[in-house]
């Protein structure tokens, strides 16, 4: 992508699905993960840049794709798992508990008399 941005006809891009850590299928037909927009006054410049991008893609040099190095079994609970997920769950639980206590305290203060009530008697 860095090479494409430096091309003379590069106009912009739309990145819908090509994010770091997300699986990208090679040579998929149809909707690509990234759409590159090329525009130039000279058609030959656009054609040259287009051919360069296609050459990068077919030589596997466009994306920096690396094989999966972590076993998916690590993600299963009870098999070592990821300690970050456990910490995140504890933090979420503590946050929820604090929010519940604050909500309860706020609700209970609504029922406390503050001494400004007056008794009206009609004779």
Image (cartoon, grey):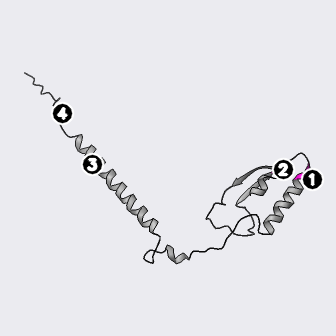
Q: Residues within 10 Å of mark 1 (few under 14, many from 20)?
A: few
CB-based contact (under 8 Å), mark 3 and mark 1: no
Q: Nearer the viewer, mark 2 or mark 3?
A: 2
Where is residue 76? Give x, y as percent. 48, 75
Q: Residue tagged by mark 1? A: 44
- 39 part of magenta stretch: yes
Quarter holding the C terminus?
Answer: top left
Q: State left or right for residue 29 relative to residue 75.
A: right
Q: Which residue is mark 2?
A: 9
Residue name at image x 50 percent, y 75 percent: 74
Name the spot of residue 100 as percent of width and height, x first: 31, 52
| The magenta stretch spans residue 68 | no
Question: Tag on residue 112?
Answer: none
Q: How far is disc 4 from disc 1 in space, using C-alphas?
A: 82 Å
N-term mark: 2 or 1 = 2
Residue at x 50% of width, y 73% of height: 75
At a point 82% along the width and 53% down the height, the residue shown is: 7
Disc 4: which residue: 114
Considering only order in the chain, which callout, 4 or 3, is on the residue closer to the N terminus? 3
Q: Read off the magenta span.
A: 38-45
Mark pair 3, 4: CA separation: 19 Å
Instruction: Give the image quarter of residue 56.
Output: bottom right
């Amino acid at each position: 992508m860095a090479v494409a941005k430096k091309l003379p006809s590069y106009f912009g891009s739309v990145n819908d699905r090509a994010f770091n850590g997300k699986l990208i299928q090679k040579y998929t037909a149809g909707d690509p993960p990234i759409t590159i927009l090329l525009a130039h006054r000279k058609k030959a410049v656009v054609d040259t840049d287009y051919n360069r991008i296609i050459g990068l893609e077919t030589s596997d040099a466009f994306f920096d794709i690396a094989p999966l190095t972590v076993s998916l079994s690590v993600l299963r609970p009870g098999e070592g798992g990821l300690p970050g997920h456990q910490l995140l769950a504890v933090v979420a639980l503590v946050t929820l508990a604090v929010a519940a206590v604050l909500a309860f305290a706020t609700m209970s203060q609504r029922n406390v008399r503050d001494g400004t009530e007056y008794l009206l008697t009609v004779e």
